[in-house]
Image (spheres, helix red, strand yellow):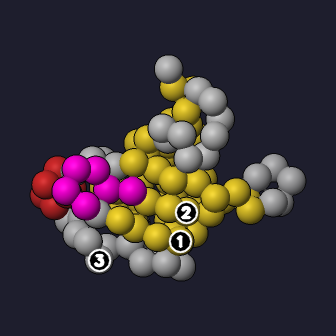
Amino acid sequence: MLLTRSTWEAAVTKFICPILTALVYFDVKDDKGNMVHWVGETGSPSALAPVGWSKSILEPGDVIMVYIFASKTGDPADGTRLDDTVLGGDKHPN
């Protein structure tokens, strides 16, 4: 079960694009200004390619807007699904 959708400005720390699903590691500041490390899952590389994604589209330090459904547990690395990601003003569905 997923919680409500959230929108954050995030800094990419790592992007892994293996065969099944791609993972975006990113940092977001919480309400108290503390940095929280998140991992979000996207679609497969074959699903991302038609909308312009590639293995090199995200690099550490890139600032992106993420739209996510956080996991029920609230753990930033537990089943978080990226709903959309905005890169350079373009919206890329996942």
Mark 3 neighbour density, 10 Å: few (under 14) some (14–19) many (20 or more): few
Q: Can you identify the residue that label 2 sits on? A: 26
Q: Can you identify the residue that label 1 sits on? A: 13
In the rendered view, does 83 fall on the left or right side of 50? right
Span highlighted in magenta in the image = 18-23
Percent x, y of residue 5: 54, 34
Is residue 41 visible in this depiction of the protein? yes
Residue 46 numbered mark, or none? none
- The image shows residue 47, relative to residue 24, as above or below, that is above
Whether label 3 touches label 2, CB < 8 Å: no
In the rendered view, does 10 fall on the left or right side of 30? left
Residue at 49% x, 46% y: name it. Answer: 67
Percent x, y of residue 73: 63, 30
Q: Tell me which numbered mark, 3 or 2, is placed earlier along the sequence.
A: 2
Q: Tell me which numbered mark, 1 or 3, is placed earlier along the sequence.
A: 1
Q: Is residue 85 magenta?
A: no
In the rendered view, does 47 fall on the left or right side of 17? left
